[in-house]
Structure formats: C-alpha cells, structure tokens
Image: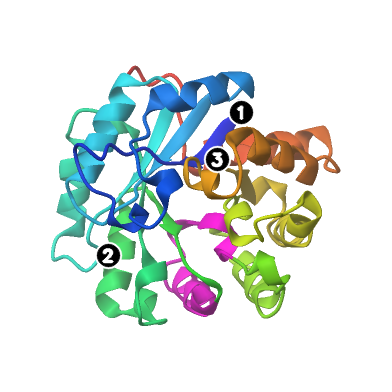
Amino acid sequence: MRVDAHHHLWDLSVRDQPWTRELPVLRRSFGLDDLRPSLRRHGVDGTVLVQTITVPEETPELLETARAAPEVLGVVGWVDLTGRDVAGDLLRLRALPGGERLVGVRHQVQEEPDPQWLLRPDVVAGLRAVAAAGLVYDLLVRPHQLEAAVQVTGLVPEGRFVLDHAGKPDVAHAALDPWRDRIRRLAERPNVACKLSGLVTEASPDWRVEDLRPFADHVLAAFGPDRVMAGSDWPVCLLAGSYDDVAAATGELVAGLDEAARADVLGGTAARWYRLDPRVAP
C-alpha cells in the first residue's frame, strides 16, 4: 500500500488560516478534489490528513472529511495538551462521525517561544494521555527544539512519536550540524519514526534533489527505512514545487534502497506506525 503520510486541507470560507496571509500561493481553499488527481497519478492508495491550526473546531471537520473520503485513512488532529482532561477530549473526538479515523495528535510546537515547551509537566501529562489512547503524537519542531524532543520521547517511552518534516533542517544553507547529531540521538529512541517530508520548503527556491539528499540520507541511515515515511506536505509544498515535483524528488531519494525498504518508506511505515486500516468503511 502506498501512503502519503502528510497532507493538509482547508476551506477559507469556513475558517481563516492566518499564517497564509503573506503567502499568495496558499491563500485559497484546498480540498480533496484538488488533491485526488495527484494521488491517482502517483498510485497513492491512502493518506494521512494533518491539522493546520490550533483550534478545537478543526479536528471534527477533518474527521468528517475522512469519514466521507475512503482515501483518507487517518487524521492527525489537535487537542490542548495542557488541558485538564486530555483523555476525555480524545474520547469525545473518537465518538464523533469519522472518529475511528483519528490516528494521532499534533501541536505547532515550532511556534512556541519556549524551546523546552515539550518538557512542561502539563504537556508531558498530555502526551501520556495521547499514548494511553493508542494514538501517535506528531512532533512539529525546529532544529533548536530537537533536544527537548529527545528528552520527552524518553520520558514517555510508552508513546509512539513521529517527527514531522525531519525536524525542519536548514536545507537552504546546507546546515547539517547540529541537526545531524540531534537526529541521530532522537533516532536512538525506538518509539520515534520520522517523516521524509517538507524538505523542499526548507531549501532554496532553485533547489535540486542533490540539495535534499544529505538530509534524506542521514534520516534513512539514522532511523532505518522501517521508521521513515514519505509525505508530500501538500499544499504547503506548492511554495517550492508541485506534488509531482515532490513525488519525483522522493523517488530519487529512495531509489538506492532495495524494494522492501522503498515499500516501507512509501507506505508500509506509515501504515504500521499510524495503524492505518483501509478496511474502515467511510
């Protein structure tokens, strides 16, 4: 099964996406009808739909979208990890239409000014509730926040974590260090996987696959293909290239792997890690 492990959808007529106001390419609505031709063209069997904004109203909408769309096998939503009843919040989401498609939770940690935000006691308690619910927690962090990610994944060993966009390294300046060592240490945690996604938007506007390769190679070497999953990051990727461009680049980056390893990166890892079930009826 081929899986796009990371994409977004939004409807500006329902809710503003303030972060797009200075990004004309993204300043419109994006729906599944826009994405489906690319999925068919690249033989993608299923996807993981990921939250974009930290409001409680968005996740029920994403679950409803997934309920009506057989290709959306999982939703990574949002809950307030610092809330008093994270476990209850997750139960309420799962009781909603499409709630069986909830596979994970994410927060825009990259926007938190405190580099130690993940280590706050209330956040750790929230992460433990996510783990107890059998859900994945997606780590959306920048390189300077990777140290906290290393620590918190050790504090919650019962959890399953996925590092989004390889920790958003500075591809444009070929800045492998200190990102490289932090990724290696994070990969030592057996409960962490990594998304091979989002690299094109961290690269220079005139990026080439060879600009991405040192970062992709390090992720693959550190985590192993059985803990790496490819995602398009569509439509955010449109800032740097089309869905086709990202798919072609990913294909080149994994071309040196054997068939089984490529199958892991292109779908198997996501299916296992998020426990995606294509048999769930829409």
Task: Tell me the residue at 47%/78% (across/down).
Answer: 148
Return the residue nearer the eye: 259 or 217.
Answer: 217
Residue on which disc 1 sits = 2
Please, what is the three-letter code of the amino acid marked with disc 2?
Gly
Q: Position of residue 117 (x, y in %)?
A: 35, 77
Magenta range: 144-168
Instruction: Relative to 175, say whether 65 is above or below.
Output: above
Looking at the rendered structure, the secondary structure element under dot 3 is: helix
Q: CA distance from mark 2 to mark 3?
A: 23 Å
Q: Is residue 129 left or right of residue 35?
A: left
Task: Tell me the residue at 44%/23% (across/down).
Answer: 71
Residue 126's disc number: 2
Instruction: Relative to 58, say whether 46 is above or below.
Output: above
Q: Position of residue 244 (x, y in %)?
A: 64, 33
Q: Is residue 160 magenta?
A: yes
Return the residue nearer the eye: 124 or 118.
Answer: 118
Q: Position of residue 172 (x, y in %)?
A: 67, 66
Q: Is residue 167 magenta?
A: yes
Task: Tell me the residue at 78%/62% (across/down).
Answer: 214
Residue on which disc 3 sits = 270
The quarter of the picture where the C terminus appears is top left
